[in-house]
Image (cartoon, grey):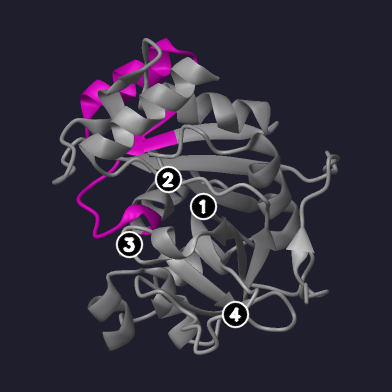
Amino acid sequence: MTNPFRTRIGTKVSKAVQFTVIVPVRLASTRLPDKPLAEIGGKPILLHVLQRAREADAERIVVATDAPQLVKLATEAGFEAVLTGPCANGTERAAQAAAKLEIKGIIVNLQGDEPAIDPAVIRAVAQRSCDGHCDCATAAAPISRAQAASPDNVKVVLRGDGTAACFSRAPIPFFRVEQSTETHLGHIGLYAFAPGKLAQSQQLPPCEWEQTELLEQLRWLWHGWSIATIVTPKYCHGIDTPDDLQAARENFNNA
């Protein structure tokens, strides 16, 4: 039976919410070096992501990076960019940029390898983060059991109120009953932080759970944060490997 508490995206999303999108990005990807510059349909991945943020009607869009080359790419395309120092993860980089530029209000941390993300998802997650009942918001979508078996696809299990109970690279939940009609939920790579929460996230000490799975959001759960989770019908997986890039190019050409 469908969980009635899951927040789902309709065809219309309110335009009342104002938010900033920060895209943390670097060139030194171990599995796909220079990933932001790899082209899909003749345009770098980073510019596809920034265009999705623009289509979501973000009030402000900022690239946060340690690479001058990416600052140049973004600014020449009409977007704002800022250089940051060394960072352990994308959220830390986004927080550095927000502090440096004194950005307030709702901040969406949108991963720089999500060129196919639906702008409506970006906006819906931003809207969800401002309702006063969560510390931050994110998104997920149903995935197949084959997709769930890959550690590259992060899974999330929700509580009855639609907040995240757990994230894992393992295929959670485990379906003990084979005829179960439930599906796995794959996590989508963005977070919308309620005002002040992005800076607060950097004051939380790391936890063993986070360090075991290499998932920064587990730190927030460990410390009691409420992570509201929008469920959307279409899964959007970031580009992590050469195979992901090839698949994205094929999907673009077949669209």
Q: Secondary structure at mark 4?
A: loop
The Cα atoms of the two marked residues, 3 and 2, are separated by: 19 Å
Asked if residue 195 shows in the view, the reply is yes
Query: Whole-Å distance between the Cαs marked 4 and 1?
Result: 32 Å
Q: Give the labeled residue for mark 2.
A: 111
Circle on res. 179: 4
Tell me the element at label 2. loop
How would you rate the neighbour count of disc 2 (Cα within 10 Å): few for under 14, some for 14-19, many for 20 or more? many
Q: Give how far across and how far down residue 64 sits, in percent.
A: 37, 39
* Kind of residue at disc 2: Gln
The mark that comes first in sequence, 4 or 1, is: 4
Q: Nearer the viewer, mark 3 or mark 2?
A: 3
In the picture, the quarter occupied by the C terminus is top right
Residue at the spot x=83%, y=40% of the render? Answer: 11
Q: Which residues are magenta?
A: 63-91
Q: Secondary structure at mark 3?
A: loop
Q: Which residue is mark 3?
A: 150
Magenta span contains residue 130: no
The residue that mark 1 highlights is 190
- Tally the marks: 4
